[in-house]
Amino acid sequence: MKLYDYPGAPNPRRVKIFAAEKNINLELVNCDMSKREHKTPEFLKKNPSGKIPVLELDDGRCISESVAICRYLESIKPEPNLFGKDPFELAFVESRNRHIELELWTQIGTSWVNGPIVGSLGIFNQIPDAKLASDKNVNLFYKRLDREFSSSKFVAGDRYTIADITLMSAIDFASDLVDLKPDEKLHNLYRWHLEVSSRPSANN
């Protein structure tokens, strides 16, 4: 199986971490976003949305969207389980993952699009006030996470799941490229981050 990837891109990293946890080997294919290779007619046949990651199966069929790809990998190799083992856990892990995607990732994305790196490309009309608001929302969500981690070892309870992969990828991207590193006073959040970052899969 081939995974269309770009170094530093957070969503392909989610899939790479997930696959590493499953001990699934993926052939990485570099899709150079700086050269707009994800917008070429050839690539749009693989994913009409023009985004990475894309998982290409051995028979040529393609799956886009990181969580959808991870669900496929979970279905072909169910253990170690990362989406939930029973009806409640399946729903709870899904809800926690969605909290991070909808309430944190979207805000990081707004700050990224309206930040200096994207600004230097000159491809978007940036809105400074939008960045001010999203920066504030990201930091408020970090504080919320710190409170939650005072009574929860991982994002969705007492074990590592897809929700932890989503959050780690978000925080690392925000810290490295969006200048939105969590405040060092958020000790519970840092405890969690140190633990998940120590897993071998986090090196992807």
Image (spheres, helix red, strand yellow):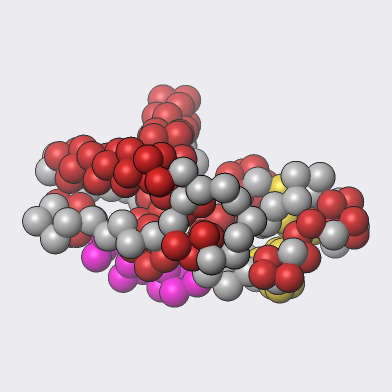
Q: How many marks?
A: 0
Can the viewer see residue 171? yes
> From what the image shows, is residue 3 above or below residue 151?
below
Where's residue 58, x and y in %? Answer: 85, 62
In depth, the one of 182 and 116 nearer the eye is: 116
> From what the image shows, is residue 126 above or below residue 203?
above
In depth, the one of 104 and 201 nearer the eye is: 104
In which quadrant of the rendered image does the N terminus lie? Answer: bottom right
The residues colored magenta run 193-204
Q: Residue at x 33, y 62 (%)?
A: 179
Can the viewer see residue 63? no
Residue 172 within the magenta-colored segment of the rendering: no
Q: Residue at x 32, y 44 (%)?
A: 132
Q: Residue at x 9, y 56 (%)?
A: 185
Q: Quick check: 143 left or right of 18?
A: left
Dominant secondary-structure state across the stretch colored magenta = helix
Where's residue 78, x and y in %? Answer: 58, 48
Where's residue 32, x and y in %? Answer: 70, 71
> From what the image shows, is residue 183 above or below residue 81?
below
Where's residue 55, x and y in %? Answer: 73, 57
Q: Residue at x 68, y 66 (%)?
A: 33
Q: Quick check: 87 left or right of 7?
A: left
